[in-house]
Image: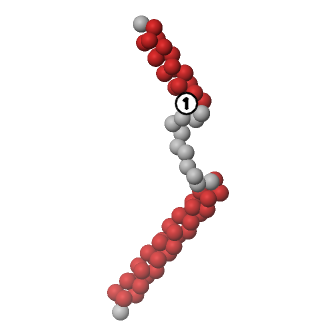
Amino acid sequence: MRYIGLILALGAICWVLYQAAGGGEAETVITAEQQQSLDKAKGMEHALQEASRKSMEEAEKKAAGN
């Protein structure tokens, strides 16, 4: 019985230490500045894709009109 209590107490202590150390949170090697740059790049990529889509639609309309 003592061993079961000891194991449960050890498990509880480990869990508390794990939570106190930020356990469960996603850890990443990307810094906040790098993440901001990636977000800006994604926004730029989206804008370029949208512009190219509009350009292709206009070219298709011109081609269909001729």
> As rendered, which of 43 and 35 lies closer to the eye?
35
Residue drawn 55% across and 30% down?
18
Q: Position of residue 61 (x, y in %)?
A: 38, 83
The quadrant holding residue 53 is bottom left
Element under label 1? helix
> As rendered, which of 32 and 52 lies closer to the eye?
32
> As rendered, which of 63 and 22 lies closer to the eye?
22
The quadrant holding residue 35 is bottom right
Residue 51 to residue 1: above or below: below
Q: Position of residue 49 (x, y in %)?
A: 47, 72
Residue 29 to residue 5: above or below: below
Residue drawn 55% across and 49% down?
28
Q: Quadrant of the C terminus?
A: bottom left
Residue drawn 50% across and 75% down?
51
User: Residue most toward the top?
Assistant: 1
The residue type indicated by label 1 comes to Tyr
